């Protein structure tokens, strides 16, 4: 597996991953919003460019053998949504879950966090998302609090 910078070259592979989730903007880690039009070549290219130049978040796609397995985003300390959404968000396409893809990607992003001078990252997920909580704990995270239906996890950056 590799973490790759979002690219127009992976448009078809990304669309296959996106289709596996079904319609909507629920794939954490891809930075997709309702304002993004990704069906046309130009719209997809515009979205990829927005991801590539974002100064407050680093986006990577999890790729293997020219397939997009998922996406992961590292929000920098300057990102205003860190307090609410945490530093890291990720999603793995349903057919690739259960084989350690997300844990591997989180650990890889910790190295990028270290390069940015971060000493700890925060992740936020639903209390009932046992798979994500286990992923974060395998990556070195510790639960530090719950608020309503959300659990907060801190992960030290090596």
Image (cartoon, grey):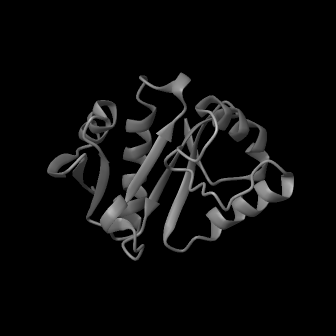
Percent x, y of residue 48: 70, 58
33 or 30, which lies in front? Answer: 33
Image position of 20 (left or right of 116): right
Percent x, y of residue 108: 42, 47
24 or 113, which lies in front? Answer: 24
- Residue farthest toward the front in the current orientation of the protein: 148
58 or 21, which lies in front? Answer: 21
The residue located at (76%, 44%) in the rendering is 11
Q: Quadrant of residue 105?
A: top left
The residue located at (16%, 47%) in the rendering is 143
Q: Is residue 109 above or below residue 82?
A: above
Image quadrant occupied by the C terminus: bottom left
Image position of 54 (left or right of 113): right
112 or 54, which lies in front? Answer: 54
Q: Quadrant of residue 107?
A: top left
The residue located at (43%, 23%) in the rendering is 99
Image position of 45 (left or right of 122): right
The residue located at (56%, 56%) in the rendering is 31
Q: Is residue 17 above or below residue 141?
A: above
Percent x, y of residue 122: 28, 58
Image quadrant occupied by the N terminus: top right
């Amino acid at each position: 597996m590799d973490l790759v910078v979002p690219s127009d070259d992976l448009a078809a592979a990304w669309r296959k991953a996106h289709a596996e989730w079904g319609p909507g903007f629920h794939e954490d880690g891809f930075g997709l919003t309702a304002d993004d039009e990704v069906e046309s070549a130009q719209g997809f290219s515009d979205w990829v460019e927005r991801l590539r130049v974002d100064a407050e978040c680093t986006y990577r796609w999890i790729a293997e053998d020219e397939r997009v397995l998922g996406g992961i985003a590292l929000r920098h300390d300057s990102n205003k949504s860190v307090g609410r959404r945490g530093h890291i968000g990720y999603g793995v396409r349903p057919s690739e879950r259960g084989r350690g893809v997300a844990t591997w990607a989180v650990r890889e992003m910790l190295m990028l966090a270290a390069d940015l001078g971060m000493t700890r990252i925060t992740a936020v997920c639903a209390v009932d998302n046992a798979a994500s909580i286990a992923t974060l704990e395998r990556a070195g995270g510790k639960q530090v609090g719950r608020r309503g239906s959300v659990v907060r996890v801190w992960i030290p950056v090596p």
